Amino acid sequence: MNETLASWIRESKRIVFFGGAGVSTESGIPDFRSVDGLYNQQYDYPPETILSHTFFMRKPEEFFRFYRNKMLFPDAEPNAAHAKLAQWEAEGKLTGVVTQNIDGLHQKAGSKKVFELHGSVLRNYCMRCGKFYGLDHIMHTTGVPKCECGGTIKPDVVLYEESLDNDVVNGACAAISEADMMIIGGTSLNVYPAAGLVDLYRGNRLVLVNLSSTPQDRRANLVVHERIGQVFAELP
């Protein structure tokens, strides 16, 4: 166990966790950027193009083919990192989880104060009438999912070219700026504007847990280059 990290957690009262794809990959959800060998045989466009607002509007059939195949993992279960964060929140030590992930695993583990910067695959809305649809509806339809009113159903996921939800961003900003400890895990911190939120932290317990180095490593008070699930499983 990293004793410095463990002691900081014991002493802190307002921990905020900021996480990315690396938190979900340990639950068996691949990072969509890690394109596999079959990818180019199946799709004519790079993932970032398919997951853009323009592409969604112009080629919705192709968007949903990729989306159902590469973005939806309904059987995924929370891992040790999700569980530990939920535990700290229940103990009154953690004041918020800020996540770039869209899989809902933090809530599945029991976390309640979750700021989903990029939305969630669990929520879907008709673009015409606003009616809500759950993940099951998307999973059990083919082609472009339609509402009973005839409108197209869109996942409540922030696509490229779309802006983040103001209420979510404001909540995340408030939590980070008031935190006495911030743990960043499973993210390269290369995706903006989300990565810019880290600059709001003013404390002296900035911890980075990531397999590879990030642009913020130099600024951090503690850097741990290990798998996040393994690190969290050993913490108090």
Image: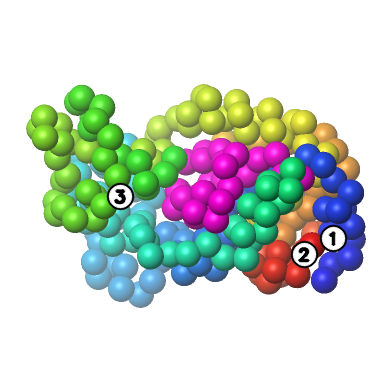
Q: Quadrant where the N terminus lies?
A: bottom right
User: Which of the two discs, 3 and 2, labels the residue nearer the N terminus?
Assistant: 3
Name, please, the residue furthest toward the bottom: 37
Magenta stretch, residue numbers: 93-118
User: Which of the two discs, 1 and 2, labels the residue nearer the N terminus?
Assistant: 1
Which amino acid, by three-letter code, is at mark 2? Leu
Give the Cα distance between marks 1 and 2. 6 Å
Q: Position of residue 6 (x, y in %)?
A: 84, 60
* Residue position for label 1: 6
Looking at the image, residue 55 sits to the left or right of residue 190; the answer is left
Q: Position of residue 42 (x, y in %)?
A: 24, 66
Label 1–label 2 contact, CB within 8 A: yes
* Residue position for label 3: 135
Residue placed at 74% from the left, 43% from the top? 92
Whether the magenta-drawn stretch holds residue 79 is answered as no
Identify the secondary structure beneath mark 2: loop
Image-quadrant location for residue 127:
top left
* Residue position for label 2: 235
User: Which of the two discs, 3 and 1, labels the residue nearer the N terminus?
Assistant: 1
- Local crowd at mark 3 within 10 Å, few (<14), some, or many (≥20)? some
